[in-house]
Amino acid sequence: MISAMKPATLQRAGFAAIALAALVIAERAWGTALRDPAMLTGWTLFALVLLLAIYGVKKALPFLPLGQSTRWMHLHSWAGFLAVAAYVMHAGVRLPTGPLETLLALSFVLVAASGIAGLALARLLPPMLRARGEPILFSRLPGLRRTLAERAAALVAPSRALADHHRLHLAEWLASPDDALAHLRGSRRPLQRRLEHTEALFRYLSPDELMTARSLIDVIKQKDLLDAHHALQSALRAWTLVHIPVTGALVLLAAAHALTVIAFRGGV
Amino acid sequence: MDVQQARTGITPAGMVDAAEKIPRPARWDVPFDGGMSEASVDRVLAVAPFSVIDAAKFPAKIPLRGVMTNDARIVRFKKGDIVVREGDYGDSAFFVLSGAVRVVLSRGAEGGLPPAMLGRRESKERTFVEAAMQLFRSRMPEVHADVGKRPGTAPVAVAVPTADSTKVPPFTSPPDVPPTGASPKAVVRTMPLAEIDDAGHTRVFLQDVPAILDRYRTARMGAGELFGEIAALGRTPRTATVFADETAELLEIRWHGLRELRRYAPAIKEHVDKIYRQNSLLVHLRETPLFKHLSADELAGVAETVRFETHGDFDWYGSYKSYSEKSAAEKLEKEPLIAKEGDAPQGVVLLRAGFARVSRKAGSGELTTSYLGRGQVFGLDEIAHAWKTGAAVPNQASLRALGYVDVIVVPADVVVARVLPKLPEALMPPFLAIASEGDAIGVVTAPRTREESVLREFLVENRFINGQATMVIDLDRCIHCDDCVDACAATHDNNPRFVRHGVQLGRHLVANACMHCVDPVCMIGCPTGAISRSVQGPVVINDATCIGCGTCARACPYDDIRMVEVRTPDGRYVVDERTNAPITLATKCDLCIDQSGGPACVRACGHDALARVDLSDPASLTQWLSR
């Protein structure tokens, strides 16, 4: 796996490994010097959380000359992994106790998990989206869906058989996004099922209705494509709904935790 | 029977019956500016050098009178009116019929007229504090505080508005009052004034001509003199600003007419070629590495022998959309052949303007092996190989014009006799590995180069190689977050200057964003010079002098310029006080020329999916692909 990494990625991973090693050594040295290692790992973790949160601020101010987001993203990713390691060193692998600690741990886990999920989705989903044809802007999906639904309704209106099929099996499906999980898995089964269901009607249709039914097949394929785009693009956005707001909570809770530590620090 | 016939039941014969019958479109269906009157044509043909042109040498389909009637017009300028601006792209030349014009000889960023005086945008990179201040500006899209405050217009803030709009006089109204309502910004104070002449042409004029004459070196050109032909024929920027020194009548000849005159009137051809040889050729040859080592005399000797050729369609952008829908074979067929694979090389072809495709036979088609732009040469390798080995070598590839190409051909015997013997070894092309017909197919099937090869064909066929900062998106990395779009909006009046949509090949998407073309056809025909190439390189629009005519948006073959309705700072739409039509301005990507840190779209992409690539340079593409 390492041999498949690009040199720049290897370099960044190397820096992260060195930083982690330095933290481990410092923690040991701190303990040897009879100081509380949790203070070192705690403040390191707090600094890392602030560094990670600053990326959000950078993104919100795109007109400021603060460098390329790609570099920030690399820093964000590797600092995130480092923060997970620092958290484990700081809190250990155990269930938290007390309300503040529980909230703090929960928010950290949520932020870390959603971040890792986001990173994975950002690698996995774009090629899947590309495989579904030309890009469609997310904001245009509802309008395109509505147009398709109207087209289908207009197509089937003159045919009783097709109108019934549309009313019972297609109208609701055409009205809103569907089959999200199947599209996320890359499965074509829901589309296949709908196509087979519609094609089963062919033998009962007149030549004119048959032509209409073929147009309806096109509509079904296009709606399936819109659903795929909706599912995949929604997934690419959904994780941020957890990651960003919980990051805000995490910063506040971490600050409260730090204040508490300072307030109740005993002197020697 | 095709699908359409199957659905409608209409046979081809039936289609013909039902079709709307029109005369076949002909060349002069749309004459230049409505066409010249017979009396005007008589007047022009009585003046030298047109009076000595032998009309009998023109073919029956393209008579001299027809050229004059349809490809020329007489335009009148008042003292101070700008005729052409340094740096503009134009498709016409001017002949002084009466009066006089003045050429500004001081040139360039140092000595020429300041950009603001010519109606251009002056861009300065923001400081960090200025960049941060953008946080506090209006959240409404396309708020243009200066729109209603043009010099010469009444103060628009007091114009009685409708509930949601502000009415302003047309941007080009004559200035009958001093610019009391003008914004204190320098760009507004120094921009030229504009007006519409009796024939409906927008005229931009210089203020304080005596001061310009005092400060800048100028030369007067009187009746009988021709200017602007080199830029028009060579598709190169105008090299000087010319303005009317007194009331002047100029014959403006569009490129099509100039081409015919050059082709069928030897005197005109000699005149144009002589001017080019005198003014530009030696400089151009000197800039080419191949000729750098020659002495001044030797270079002059070579310059005497060169042939000027133009290939392709000057107005290629007009037919670009129908061209882009054709198959690869049809496209290739449409591209004029400059040199053919297998033929004996006639000389070294040096590109002066435009792009050319280098291709080799592959299967039943052609493989594009490279593309050449301004300053690059074709044919040297074969001639050098033959000179070194004594064995004649045919052209190893074909050269075809993409759009419009202007070339210089240095004859093969001149290259052999005068250039190659003095060429330093470091510049000498290596021995050719002579290819046999069909070898190229191996490149198409080789997995290592397939992606680049296919992408190169795509970029050439769609003429994206014209772009110096083309927005290319890697769809395998793009997460569709629209951070690029949001960043563009945040830095450009809350309205993004591009669409994250466009033409796709595999994982690459060429988005609808201004590519800042090598051949910026959008700049041809702008009546006020509002769209121009900035000193820094990107093509930019000056909001203060854009009159919203839409010429640039229609000319852009890639649909990368948009007309937008504008608002005042309090959110009201601005409309024309006479027609109530919305006032629109042309908008496009300016490559964040006034933002520090480079294009906001690139800076905002967190996944290395978006880049601005100089596709006119094949090496940039290779570098981006291997990132």
Image (cartoon, coloured by chain):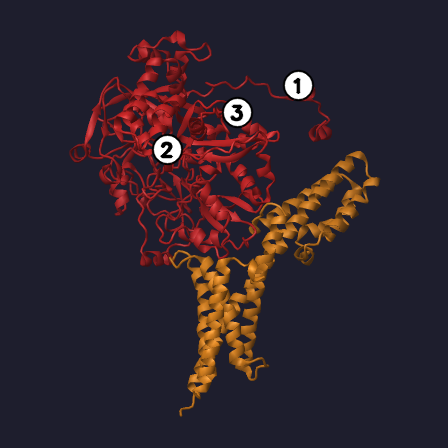
Q: Nearer the viewer, residue B340 or A42?
A: B340
Tag 2 residue = B526
Res. B176 in view: yes
Q: Earlier in the sequence, mark 3 or mark 1?
A: 1
Query: Farthest residue toward the top?
Result: B56
Q: Is residue B611 above or below residue B203?
A: below
- The image quadrant that residue B275 belongs to is top left
- The image quadrant that residue A221 belongs to is top right
Chain appearing in orange on the rendered image? A
Q: Is residue A168 above or below residue B7?
A: below
Which residue is drawn at the image coordinates 35% and 53% (left, top)? B596
Left or right, residue A168 beside residue B468:
right
Q: Is residue A208 above or below residue B136?
A: above
* Residue type, numbered disc 2: Cys
> Marks 2 and 3: which is nearer the front?
3
Across and down, in percent, residue A200 comes to 81, 45
Tag 3 residue = B342
Q: CA distance from mark 3 to mark 1?
A: 47 Å
Q: Earlier in the sequence, mark 2 or mark 1?
A: 1
Q: Which mark is residue B17?
A: 1
Report which colour depicts chain B: red
- The image quadrant that residue B36 belongs to is top left
